Amino acid sequence: MNPYYSILTKAEDTGNLSAGEIKNLLDPPSSKEENELFKAADRVRQYYMGDEIWLRGIIEFSNKCSRNCIYCGLRAQNTKKWRYEMTVDEIVNTSKLIASLEIGTVVLQSGEYRSCPLEKLKTVIKRIKEIDLAITLSIGEYPRDIYRELKQAGADRFLLRHETADPDLYEELHPGYKIKDRINALKILKEEGYEVGCGFMVGLPGQTLDILAKDVLLCKDIEADMVGIGPFIPHPDTILKDEKQGDFQMTLRLLAAIRLVCRDVHLPATTAMATIDEFGREKAWQAGANVVMPTATPKPYRQAYELYPDKKCLEDSVEHCRGCLEMRILSVGRKVGIGQGGSYKKKKK
Ligand code: 5AD
Ligand code: SF4
């Protein structure tokens, strides 16, 4: 048998691959093999996750950030940025709008503060819990007691991308921070009872296939409930402004590899994928993805939440996106998930 297909069959049947085998999977000899990779991931997605595509409404409630990730437009040292923070009422009202559109999850995302705005977040979480919505936080690294208090207030899930599994590359991208602390934070979140999401960027300067294979294996090791990946997109206000953007097909192959190796995780077709390819979301849903996260952040805040430039759907209201996404979901023969769409881990083995 074509050696590519024997690895692909093993991946589809067992999900147990070595780093070397994942590397091979990410480097198909031709587009024929690449298509078979996507089809295998689509079958595994169908078996473990069914045909629903889950919507998560994101509220980027603040673009303040104390960190300096070298790729990001919101880095603290970017003084060109107008910094905002939505009020409790603005966040709760936007959550009500999300619920009224039959979207079952709100994701509260921000930059990472020097110290967590704990009391405000607890108030927001308690008020959102009066509506029937699952709450996902995406607010960065904090000590265990903060995570615990936010969980007790009613938060359900937590997204904390690991960004890259390679210790040296991690330190280059995040001066002063270490991957082991990031992984430890993910472990703590699990221990505190959150459903957790990790994830990484594809096409970072200095990233190799070896590193990407480690990224996939790390997602499995962490036993993540969700994995978010997207291409790196250079931001003009950063020192990486002249670097190449991540490759779309490689991002798609990584999605497929994560589906094959991690089996029952939630995998979003990310806005970054839609930004670099007109049909990025549809292609992602046909290569293993089963989630999409429309932005519900109101104007004028959403324009100022610029992690990377030219974000897709920036001018479209969440009401518009709800309709547009449903059409796109139906166009690939899938259906909109109704409800909260929590973790599928261990539902079906
Ligand atoms: N290109 C693509 N993704 C980026 N992120 C931050 N900056 C960029 C960029 N320039 C991603 C990071 C972060 C998430 C919120 O956005 O992975 O975790
Ligand atoms: Fe801040 Fe997140 Fe951007 Fe890093 S990626 S600078 S933590 S907003």
Image (spheres, grey):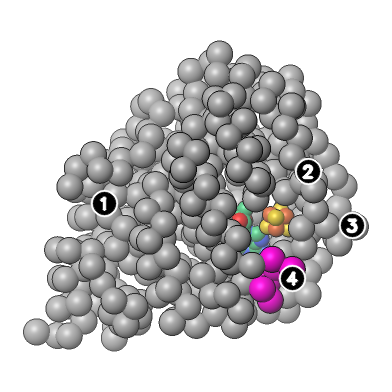
Where is residue 309? Give x, y as percent: 70, 59
Query: Which three-letter amino acid code belongs to the residue tagged 4?
Result: Pro
Magenta region, residue range? 171-177
Where is residue 73? Give x, y as percent: 76, 59
The quadrant in which residue 93 appears is top right
Picture quadrant of ligand 1: bottom right
Query: Which three-letter amino acid code belongs to the residue tagged 1?
Result: Arg
Q: Which mark is residue 115?
A: 2
Q: Which residue is mark 1?
A: 45
Sequence order check, earlier mark of 3 and 4: 3
Q: Is residue 241 visible?
A: no
Q: Secondary structure at mark 4?
A: loop
Q: Secondary structure at mark 2?
A: loop
- Which of these two is toward me, 220 or 291? 220
Sequence order check, earlier mark of 2 and 4: 2
Q: Which residue is mark 4?
A: 175
Q: Which residue is mark 3?
A: 80
Sequence order check, earlier mark of 3 and 2: 3
The residue that appears at 45% across and 23% down in the rendered structure is 102
Q: Secondary structure at mark 3?
A: loop
